[in-house]
Amino acid sequence: MIGRDTALGSTVPVDLRLYGILDVDVCGDDGADLAEMAAEAVSGGCTLLQYREKAIGNARESLARIRAIKEAITGTGVPLLVNDRCDLALAAETEGVHLGQSDLHPVEARHILGPRSIIGLTLKSGPQADELYRLPVDYACIGGVFATTSKDNPDPPVGLDGFSRIAFRARLARGTGFPVGAIAGIDGSNAAAVIVAGADGIAVISALFSDHDVEARASDLRHRVDSALAARGVTR
């Protein structure tokens, strides 16, 4: 199954500049609250959102939360992805999924979701980046870049130098235009440094959703990312 021929990626462009991850362990499991946070994040400048619930106990309740988030951002043009679960992404009619290295293989996810869905992948090492040449994914997030309390991570942080090396290999495998983001431990103090190291954007949880005034936090992070991209000569 894994070896069958498949197109590399969808035809949907992905903007990783500010990738907000609504993790129920950080944000809580109240669907109305999650929907409100999603709307505020988009108003503040988020370009992509993900619903993440690593230990789903009740799939129906999870689906209801995803649908509430989807409804809250409908019409904004900002895609919503679901972590890992292709079935929930299909049922909620979100724009796609984000996969880890131990989740469903991207080829199988593409087979399930079709050519128009966005599929993202977490990368933790250079050899994983080398495999991108044969994987039907639309972007990659490299991490953890820094230490984080938002997720149990047995692997040590790769740091900025490690991120740059992995990103180089990812783009070598898929081309210079392949979107590469950074994840884990990123906030206002280091967002610009991550962009300078070669990231197209940042994926954030606590820095965006752990306190009040999500819109203001998103606006601040987006400004830092856009300024660093402009200094690097990247325009959108």
Image: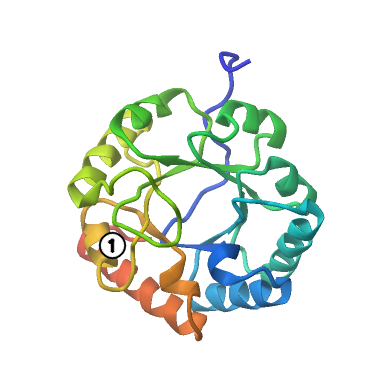
Looking at the picture, does residue 149 appear above or below residue 4?
below
- The colour scheme is rainbow
Q: Secondary structure at mark 1?
A: helix
Q: Is residue 75 visible?
A: no
**Residue at x 33% of width, y 67% of height:** 225
Quadrant in the rendering for residue 50: bottom right
As shown in the figure, which amino acid type bears the numbered disc 1?
Leu
Q: Residue at x 69, y 37 (%)?
A: 113
Residue 163 percent location from the top left of the image: 26, 46
Report whether 124 appears left or right of 50: left
Observer able to see residue 32: yes
Which of 120 and 116 lies nearest the eye of the viewer?
120
Residue drawn at the location 20% of the way across and 65% of the way down: 231
Q: Quadrant of residue 224?
A: bottom left
Percent of width and height locating residue 44: 49, 78
Q: Position of residue 202 (x, y in %)?
A: 38, 59
Seen in the picture, residue 192 relative to 87 is either above or below; the reply is below
Where is residue 94 drawn, in percent x and y? 69, 53
List the residue tagged with mark 1. Answer: 229
Residue sitting nearer the eye, 81 or 147: 147
